[in-house]
Image: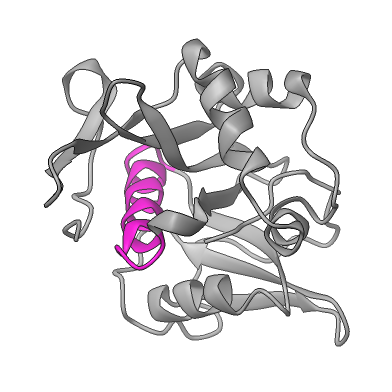
Amino acid sequence: MLAQAEPGADAAGGVVATLALPHGPALTVRTVTDSDVEGLDALFQGLSDDDRHHRFFSLRHPARKFLEQMTRAEDEGGYRLVAVVSGPEDALVAEAGYAILPDGDDEFALTVAPGWRGWRLGRYLLGAIVAAAAARGVPNLQADIMLGNALMLALVRDRGYITLHRDEFSDIRIAIGAAQPARRRQRAGTLASRAPRHFRPSEFRPQI
């Protein structure tokens, strides 16, 4: 299992962490690059219909233009990590990142391939992007989460969050304080900025 993400910036070459796996290959967490478009495409192709719905609020596979935009996160003021397993052909097995919002907060999302859940990879990636947000002065990370996405709800519950908006039948809008330590429940009013009055539609949806 991966350790808790360290607060701060990326290491040399964009590599945040490397883990030697029991069966031989290494798992590397690093910042996304232009060459990751095909890997992201394969990651999302491997999701079930339910997983894809949770991630994008749609059953449609994301267009290549959207995948290319994901690889340019930092050019647009955001941040994105990928987890890659080394081998004869490297496999991208997870991604996590955030995109800038008009109110000064950022919106986050993450995806872990079905075969890689249970390694606490989602928890690590969430911690890593929260640490990156804090280092970059982002006050809060927001997300829309479908009420049926039990894994993601459990992940943010462990991290601590406040509710910004709730639809009784479909989804919940939450925010995580970037300076808030993991495994502590946040209380109302502890976030660094107010909840926005209006929420813009976004393709950035969380999936553990």
Magenta-tinted stretch? 117-137
Residue 202 in sight here: yes
Q: Is residue 110 above or below residue 181?
A: above
In reply to whether residue 51 is colored magenta, the answer given is: no
- Return the x and y of residue 144 as percentages of the image width and height: 71, 63
Residue 190 in sight here: no
Image quarter hosting the N terminus:
bottom left
| Residue farthest toward the top in the current orientation of the protein | 34
Q: Is residue 33 above or below residue 198?
A: above
- Return the x and y of residue 67 as percentages of the image width and height: 67, 25
When asked about the image quadrant of residue 207, the answer is bottom right
- Return the x and y of residue 175 as percentages of the image width and height: 58, 66
Taking depth in this image into account, of 81 and 172 the one nearest to the observer is: 81
In reply to whether residue 124 is colored magenta, the answer given is: yes
Dominant secondary structure of the residues highlighted in magenta in the image: helix
- Return the x and y of residue 47 as percentages of the image width and height: 64, 51
Q: Is residue 177 above or below residue 203?
A: below
- For image coordinates 40% across by 79% down, the residue present is 158
- For image coordinates 66% across by 74% down, the residue present is 149
When asked about the image quadrant of residue 168, the answer is bottom right
- For image coordinates 18% across by 36% down, the residue present is 25
Is residue 77 shown left or right of residue 52? left
